[in-house]
Image (cartoon, helix red, strand yellow):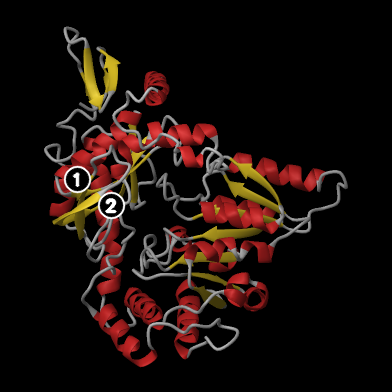
Amino acid sequence: MLVAVLTYVGYGVLTLFGYLRDFMRQWKIEKCQNATEREEQKDFVPLYQDFENFYNRNLYMRIRDSWNRPICSVPGAKVDMMERVSHDYNWTFTYTGRVIKDIINMGSYNYLGFAQKTGPCQEAAAKVLSQYGAGVCSTRQEMGNLDKHEELEKLVARFLGVESAMAYGMGFATNSMNIPALVGKGCLILSDELNHASLVLGARLSGATIRIFKHNNMQSLEKLLKDAIVHGQPRTRRPWKKILILVEGIYSMEGSIVRLPEVIALKKKYKSYLYLDEAHSIGALGPSGRGVVDYFGLNPEDVDVMMGTFTKSFGAAGGYIGGKKELIDYLRTYSHSAAYATSMSPPVVEQIITSVKCIMGEDGTTIGRARVQQLAENTRYFRRRLKEMGFIIYGNEDSPVVPLMLYMPAKIGAFGREMLKRNIGVVVVGFPATPIIESRARFCLSAAHTKEMLDTVSLSSCLPSAHNIKNVYIPLKRKCMIISENFFFPAITIPVLV
């Protein structure tokens, strides 16, 4: 409760300073005038709502340097980053020409470590590049269907344990363009409140009625299912044509794993359909890396639509949908992604084929299985280390997405900068991507991380516990304490970053 109150106070202080800075800008007292409206643009239609614009210029700009950091290497266990500086309070950046080498990469979804510039996957992709070229420049339904695409889809279907599968060139579009093909007017979508933006967009584009249930809360989901069956459609009270449940395997901002056995039980009980997004769980969960279905030891046939991406565990690009042959044949005909999107690049397809075969052991080695096991070990080890140090972390014990709670808005930028000083790249997240009182840092584990790397990140000498990210005592004789640039708090015992 105290943390929530102090977090709101922090945002309140920042907001007051924001209004003060706006007032000072009007009188040209503020040093940085980039946020001032130009004379020739005063009759333009605003691009943002008034408060959104206020938030961007007075809160986001303070810590803008914590995001969009340009890298210049393969995003593997370590990464090289181009150094940049700002001379106008983060409104613009200039590059110094210096490259910061060997930053421990805790921000990429490189779960199984296939994002690398050498190895069998890269050799196979280079060979296919010389044979097929870089792209197809056509849709699958016209002249863009290659034998490699068909090989990939058969392999993915076998990997998932389903009848058929279809591959797409973009993970986001796999959700946003296929959900409208599955449901429409007169249908009901029941969506987890923390579902990814691609699922939300697909649901909205479908024209179906959308109802939200609490995150991973089976009582909330069952109540919505009961109400949907009892009351039917609004006004007409006719039965819904179709009820589709949308969930994710691993929720990328929470690190939580869907309670899939219970979801399947409810789906069967109320005769609805289940759409499972395994973008973050495929390859990262289960004894054989087959995702959350494998993790719980369930039958893949119990999931009507199995969706996933190739961008995380497989070090490539694109997405897939797996299920019954009738479903996939239907999507080949009616999906916008199938009809209008350009086919996947052949080298990317080969990267996926090689990595999937490696995971399945069809390359004649045990490298894939070893990577799956290494990721699980790294995940449990790193989570245990953070807990031992007293940090508050979210998510399931087996989830490679590890959110570390920061809470205070001033900690967001300070944490990211302090980590970068120690050659550690980490994602920091705040409102509106998270609830206003739940700002956090997000660590993404990889099988490519060594124990030494994880120790470097987690040891108190490197993780900014030395800079009091945890509870500290601020001496009362000091009137105020600088927490972040231009952000002050009264002297008091609270969790702050100094």
Residue denoted by label 2: 69
Quadrant location, the C terminus: top left
Residue at 58%, 43% in the rendered image: 218
- What residue does disc 1 label? 420
**Amino acid identity at mark 2:** Arg
From the viewer's perspective, is 385 left or right of 6? Answer: left
Query: At which x and y percent is residue 36?
Result: 41, 34
- Residue count near mark 1 (Cα–Cα under 10 Å), binned few <14, some 14–19, many ≥20: some
Task: Quadrant for residue 17, please give it.
Answer: top left
* Camera-nearest residue between 352 and 156: 352
Judge whether 242 appears above or below 133 on screen: above
Task: Choose between 468 and 169: the one closer to the eye.
Answer: 169
Amino acid of disc 1: Leu
276 shown above or below 209: below
In the image, 183 versus 373, the foreground residue is 183
Q: Is residue 248 above or below residue 412?
A: below
